[in-house]
Image (spheres, helix red, strand yellow):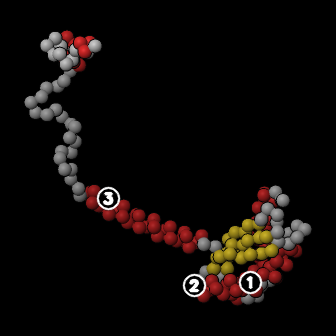
Amino acid sequence: MADPARAAKLAQRIKVVVAEALGRRVKDPRVESITITDARVTNDLQHATIYYTVFGDEIAHADAARALEKAKGVLRQEVGRNITVRLTPTLEFVADQIPVNASNLEELLREAKRRDAEVAALAAGAKHAGEADPYKGEGPEGSEEIDEDDFDEEDIDLTDDDELDEDANR
């Protein structure tokens, strides 16, 4: 097993080599709209997965996938010439879904922003159901302010109340 850091460095090198080889060595017009976005190599350095995106519609995506499969041998040969490992890794091309996911996420963020604007517009014209601050001002009508001294033990007459006598039931 190779070092994961070495595998990551090799993956980056393979990504650059494949991108350059698509422009120089592969003479297929279907690969002109392909962008290599990422590459991953297994820790044993035997298999490389290369992620790509294609500018265009579904037909362009299908054509690009066929062109990459056809050029896989030439690209692997170019990778073997430009990297220093005992065995040249096999190449697997996978369409990168990050741009699709990013556009979906952007659409969700636009929708959330639109809904936030609607809520802010409703809140701007809203009025309180009661007073603006129900806790402001004096207490309820007819009541006085309650002071700490109102709860002194000497103010309460416990002699007439049998229910409050805790020692009587024992």
Q: Quadrant of residue 40?
A: bottom right
Q: Earlier in the sequence, mark 3 or mark 2?
A: 2
Relative height, residue 146 to residue 82 (above, below):
above
What residue is pinned by disc 1? 69
The answer to which of 131 and 163 lies nearer the viewer is 163
Q: Earlier in the sequence, mark 2 or mark 1?
A: 2
Q: Quadrant of residue 30?
A: bottom right
Q: Amino acid at mark 1?
A: Glu
Relative height, residue 69 to residue 135 (above, below):
below
What residue is pinned by disc 2? 57
Q: Position of residue 142 (x, y in %)?
A: 9, 30
Side (left or right) of 19 relative to 146: right
**Residue at 50% across, 67% down:** 105
Q: Earlier in the sequence, mark 3 or mark 1?
A: 1
Q: What residue occupies the far right of the structure in this picture?
A: 86
- Is there CB contact under 8 Å for labels 3 and 1? no
Side (left or right) of 106 relative to 52: left
Q: Amino acid at mark 3?
A: Ala
Looking at the rendered structure, the secondary structure element under dot 1 is helix
- Is there CB contact under 8 Å for labels 3 and 2? no
What residue is pinned by disc 3? 120
Q: Quadrant of the N terminus?
A: bottom right
Viewer-nearest of discs 2 and 1 = 1
